[in-house]
Image (cartoon, coloured by chain):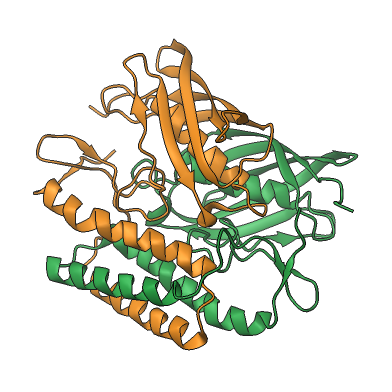
Chain colours: A green, B orange
Amino acid sequence: MSDPIPVADAEHDRALYEPLTQSVRHLVDLTIRSEADDDAVRRAHQLIDEAAALLGSRATPGSFGVRTDAAGQRMPWGNVAIGLRNAIAPPLDVHRDSDGRATVDLVLGAPYEGPPGQVHGGVCALVLDHVLGATAHHRHQTAFTGTLTIRYVRPTWLGPLRAEAWIEREEGSKTFAVGHILGPDGEVTAQAEGVFIRPRPAR
Amino acid sequence: MSDPIPVADAEHDRALYEPLTQSVRHLVDLTIRSEADDDAVRRAHQLIDEAAALLGSRATPGSFGVRTDAAGQRMPWGNVAIGLRNAIAPPLDVHRDSDGRATVDLVLGAPYEGPPGQVHGGVCALVLDHVLGATAHHRHQTAFTGTLTIRYVRPTWLGPLRAEAWIEREEGSKTFAVGHILGPDGEVTAQAEGVFIRPRPAR
């Protein structure tokens, strides 16, 4: 694994990119739901291409990868689940207890739809993969998913949701985690179990 | 389930929204990778907000839901995996054989990152959920995921990928499907098995 790329001024970058990304999330949502007249849509399209040209005037090749701030904290800003610069990410703001229990409250709208009005089963899997995986993180080290099993017990409706996960047991570098997604009335919509693996340090 | 919403002119809407959404996908990618100077980022942010105001001048409440064109074909345009108006969707263009085998070639870039340079395990799950589920579609009827199990056997690197799925067996409304993701050299990176359920018709 390559060395993390240090970032000169993470707070400056956060203040610049976090609200930008929030606006792009809003744009993704409206691109799905817009019923504007054709001229407005075409003008919006032009503005979006202008914005992309500005952002692309200088861009890192490849992906965001792993970077660290001046204090050595990981900045997973490109991450599809939690990245503050990734408009696909809701983003998940996962809270971890000292015993490894992970919880996240989230609201999933139109961009996460599968069946009409419902969260796509694969998005439930993405959320559960990430929240179960978070239980296995030790001292900022990422854990990789080994296996993941999900049981969909009832529809997960778009709207406010909670995901929770906790450690069932640990064996060496493996963490066996379980968890679920809860709907607004606290009913379980999907259950998950997974095995997560921490790779050996590179050095 | 509510009746599908008929769309007056699907071809017109496709010509308007498909390239718009492609531009928004590009924007999502550049929002992650941009290294432009601050003024350019701030100007891009303004343009994006202007575009969102135009698109939002009239918008459907809630989600896109299920709509049909004049010929009665389903238009899952808001779908997070395949929706032509959903910038989160790569979008997956799944090909189905007459025996239900489903295949999709796709390229996943920076917006789908989990570990550095790799596709997030949850995105692999989203792709596999959708491709396995596609084997269970009968005459345009959506199948819901019952259970899904994924084994991650090696890293899935960002870049060109293929996902394949086929029916293992069917029992009444249940389809037992298996499949995998292949990397560029044809090696299996993740394996999946799932049970998919077709709901009884509403009427």
Residue B71 rendering spot, x and y as whole percentages: 11, 35
B75 or B47, which lies in front? B47
The residue lying at 47 percent from left, 24 percent from top is B165
Residue A33 rendering spot, x and y as whole percentages: 28, 60
**With respect to residue B92, does A68 lie above or below?**
below
A132 or B88, which lies in front? B88
Residue B155 rendering spot, x and y as whole percentages: 67, 40
Task: Report whether residue B61 is seen.
Answer: no
The residue lying at 56 percent from left, 28 percent from top is B186
Residue B134 rendering spot, x and y as whole percentages: 39, 28
Task: Report whether residue A112 is seen.
Answer: yes
Q: Quadrant of residue A2?
A: bottom right
- Give the left or right position of residue A53, taking residue B187 as reference: left
Q: Quadrant of residue B150?
A: top right
- Give the left or right position of residue A59, taking residue A35 as reference: right
Q: How many marks?
A: 0
- Give the left or right position of residue B153, taking residue A85 as reference: right
Q: Quadrant of residue B172?
A: top left
| Residue furthest to the bottom | B39
**With respect to residue B15, does B170 lie above or below?**
above
**With respect to residue B62, does A40 lie above or below?**
below
The residue lying at 41 percent from left, 80 percent from top is B45
- Give the left or right position of residue A42, taking residue A123 as reference: left
